[in-house]
Amino acid sequence: MKRYRELSPSLRTIMTPGPVEVDPRVLRAMSLPILGQFDPEFTDIMNDTMDMIRALFQTDNRWAYPIDGTSRSGIEAVLTSLIEPGDRVLVPIYGRFGHLLVEIAQRCGAQVSTLEQEWGQVFARGQVAEAILRERPDLVAIVHGETSTGCLQPLEEIGKACRASDALLVVDAVATVGGTRIAADEWMLDAVIGGTQKCLSIPAGMAPITYNERAEAKLLRRKRIERGLRDPKQEADSGGRPIQSNYFDLSQLQDYWSPARLNHHTEATSMLYALREGLRFVLEEGLEPRFARHLEHEAALVAGLRAMGLTLFGDPDCKMPMVTCVNIPDQVDGESVRSMLLHEFGIEIASSFGSLKGRIWRIGTMGFSCNKKNVLHLLGALDAALLRHGVSIPTGAAVQAALDVYDSKVDAQG
Ligand SMILES: *Cc1c(COP(=O)(O)O)cnc(C)c1O
């Protein structure tokens, strides 16, 4: 048999929109001893994690727990549990992940209508609210931060519009959670899905979610239908269908995360350790200081890129702090530059999808990867790589401009 060498991944500087570098303390937590899933020590860890997920999403919701699987599993669990075949679902799309929401909603048997915005923009005030009045959806699903375009959609107005027309609002906050403010209760978000491997800086493999009583009411109704117990008040509405998935059935999952601990799957022990410790570090830093840190390093990065003569993709008024999209200069092979960054400097940045493929690079400043060393290292390396690719740039200007941003921060505080 072939002999396989011992695993020894290179130490990379990861400046993509995920997965990003992980705090060594989180990695260490993953190597701690296994506990049985009904051991009181373990159920305490489950309860702590639920509390911390509530704090993360700024909610008092009873239900806040992780789905085992990558972020997509969280999206699938929420949509599969909340969409009944035939439900009207509205998806405002402004990038790649909007299309993912459409695909999943269609697989749930929804009648999906969409509203599309050009990539690089978000929806203007009133646009989504107007579509809600027109389409009268049962559920609206939207992305908070579109990692594919680097744009951030404000949600408050959409939350109000959904509440006013009695539609459920489901938000994919996978890329933004832990990097910028998400106030589930204040913004009237009925269900929110987060991701671990982005601004939370935990390995991929879990998706923290939360949902409120409006969303729960729908789950419980579907459960009654499954058991043949119809609610007399809803007798007229006999078209309901049980939840089609077992693994992603939130009505079963919430029983597992409740004090009843009704067995569902086996909780992913080591991944839960990682989530618990990762969230503990996020809350220990403090949400507001953490958001400010993301803005600070974004400002330094952007100043550096501009000083190099590069331009950014997308409307600056809706830019995500944790993703910066850069137009690849004419005549430059973007993949060749990325390859040089990785192989000569050990830095990874991301390419892009669809119509933006080959046109922009995407640079992530997320969580543990969002720091001064990484920003300065990347700017210096990109400066060298572009010179090597024959682009004439003011050599050294990028790092100086970023240092100026960092210095002015110190001055402002001092
Ligand atoms: C990364 C990402 C996802 C998908 O997450 P996986 O963990 O890869 O399943 C979904 N939505 C958005 C906005 C993302 O950035």
Image: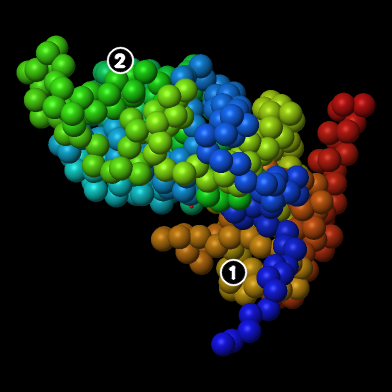
Front residue of this view, candidates 239 and 394: 239
Quadrant in which the C terminus appears: top right
**Mark closest to the chain's N terminus, 2 or 1:** 2
The mark found on residue 334 in the picture is: 1
Residue 359, position in %: x, y? 52, 63
The 10 Å Cα crowd at callout 1, few under 14, some 14 to 19, many 20 or more, is: many
The 10 Å Cα crowd at callout 2, few under 14, some 14 to 19, many 20 or more, is: few
Q: Is mark 1 within 8 Å of ligand 1?
A: no
Of badges 2 and 1, nearer the viewer stands: 2
Residue 67, position in %: x, y? 46, 40
Q: Is residue 399 left or right of residue 102?
A: right
Q: Is residue 381 left or right of residue 69?
A: right
Amino acid type of the residue that numbered disc 2 sits on in the rendered structure = Ala
Residue at 23% of width from left, 42% of height from top? 244
Q: Is residue 47 above or below residue 402?
A: above
Q: Residue furthest right?
A: 414
Q: Secondary structure at mark 2?
A: helix
Q: Is residue 392 above or below residue 89?
A: below
Amino acid type of the residue that numbered disc 1 sits on in the rendered structure = Gly
Q: CA distance from mark 2 to mark 1?
A: 46 Å
Residue at 40% of width from left, 36% of height from top? 263
Residue at 61% of width from left, 65% of height from top? 329
Residue 286 visible, this angle: yes
Q: Answer yes or no: do the residues labelled 2 and 1 have beta carbons within 8 Å?
A: no
Residue 117, position in %: x, y? 37, 43
The mark found on residue 164 in the picture is: 2
Residue 192 visible, this angle: no
Q: Is residue 84 above or below residue 106?
A: above
Give the quarter of the image for residue 213.
Answer: top left
